[in-house]
Image (tube, grey):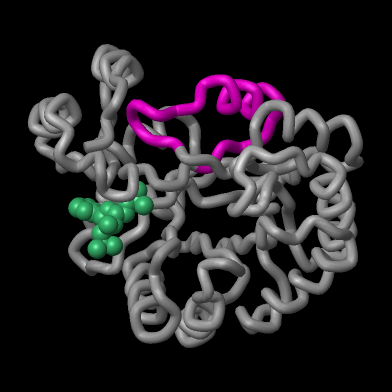
């Protein structure tokens, strides 16, 4: 079994492949369909999308057409960050399932603690309402696990204090030089799996000279070292690409960065060009 089928165990007991195919910024239609289809053909078994990416339709179609049994694929989608009501969250989930054309998702996340237009605003009450809806969905079996994304320690604490289900995952922006240590450690200590989105800093880490030095040492690319780093930090890695060459390269990360080099990478700052 290769790295694409290596798994972590969620606090629900379910397995989640350590590498997921990220689909943020891949337009619906041929691009999302072809990229997802190629990822599945190449052995990826974990696909990460969101209602707001606008590509659930093509992602779902690629899954359906893949011929791979539904239960062999781990599928995540997300509740739009603007939706902070109980009823609204239930309705948005139905829309996602219908658009994806699936009976269930493996993980359903609150996309962010605040609407994108009011980043940092306090929506604690709304998050608790939305979480109640996710708990209902979880109990119905149509989301096998539920979690959050972009949540801070305070945002998580409010869910832990007011909810009955501990989030299974917190998907955050996480890459070499930007690891949000406070929320990462808090999540991991509570058994909440951290998922790293933008493990390549949306491409902005690729020219970093320090990471390049490590990549040369291991005879790997900067992308591969960056993905491997996130895995060795016990996070799910969600690299995104529309190029077949990169989709393959990003899964060829079956090597080990030694402790000294991990410590060096841990210490890097301002890695985004
Ligand atoms: P593209 O989508 O054109 O293939 P992140 O995963 O951090 O969001 O980064 C995604 C960005 O990095 C995209 O612009 C993507 O390009 C690019 N990218 C993904 N994998 C690689 C790779 N192996 N080598 C170089 N660029 C990559």
Q: Is residue 180 left or right of residue 155?
A: left
Q: Identify which residue is drawn at 57% across, 50% down.
A: 16
Q: Identify which residue is drawn at 73% across, 53% down.
A: 145
Looking at this view, is 11 or 202 the one in front?
A: 202
In the figure, 164 relative to 265: above or below? below
**x then y, percent, for residue 128:** 86, 45
Q: Which residues are magenta?
A: 174-195
Looking at this view, is 99 or 218 the one in front?
A: 99
**x then y, percent, for residue 147:** 70, 47
Q: Is residue 200 left or right of residue 17?
A: left
Q: Identify which residue is drawn at 58% across, 20% down.
A: 182
Looking at this view, is 91 or 184 the one in front?
A: 91
Looking at this view, is 99 or 145 the one in front?
A: 99
Q: Is residue 206 magenta?
A: no
**x then y, percent, for residue 106:** 66, 61
Q: Is residue 183 left or right of residue 31?
A: right
């Amino acid at each position: 079994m290769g790295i694409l089928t290596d798994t972590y165990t969620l606090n629900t007991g379910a397995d989640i492949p350590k590498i997921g195919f990220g689909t943020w910024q891949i337009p619906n239609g041929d691009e999302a369909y072809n990229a997802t289809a190629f990822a599945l053909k190449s052995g990826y078994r974990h696909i990460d999308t969101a209602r707001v990416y606008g590509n659930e339709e093509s992602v779902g179609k690629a899954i359906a057409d893949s011929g791979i049994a539904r239960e062999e694929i781990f599928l995540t989608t997300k509740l739009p960050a603007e939706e902070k009501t109980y009823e609204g969250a239930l309705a948005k989930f139905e829309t996602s399932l219908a658009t994806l054309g699936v009976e269930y998702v493996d993980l359903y996340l609150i996309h962010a603690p605040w609407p994108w237009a009011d980043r940092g605003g306090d929506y604690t009450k709304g998050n608790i309402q939305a979480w109640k809806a996710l708990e209902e969905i979880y109990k119905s079996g149509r989301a096998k696990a539920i979690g959050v994304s972009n949540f801070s320690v305070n945002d998580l604490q409010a869910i832990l204090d007011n909810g009955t289900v501990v989030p299974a995952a917190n998907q955050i922006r996480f890459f070499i030089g930007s690891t949000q240590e406070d929320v990462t450690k808090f999540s991991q200590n509570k058994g909440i799996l951290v998922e790293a989105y933008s493990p390549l800093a949306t491409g902005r880490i690729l020219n970093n000279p320090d990471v390049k030095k490590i990549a040369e040492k291991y005879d790997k690319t900067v992308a591969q070292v960056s993905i491997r780093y996130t895995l060795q930090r016990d996070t799910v890695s969600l690299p995104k690409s529309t190029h077949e060459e990169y989709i393959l390269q990003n899964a060829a990360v079956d090597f080990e960065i030694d402790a000294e080099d991990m410590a060096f990478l841990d210490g890097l700052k301002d890695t985004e060009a």
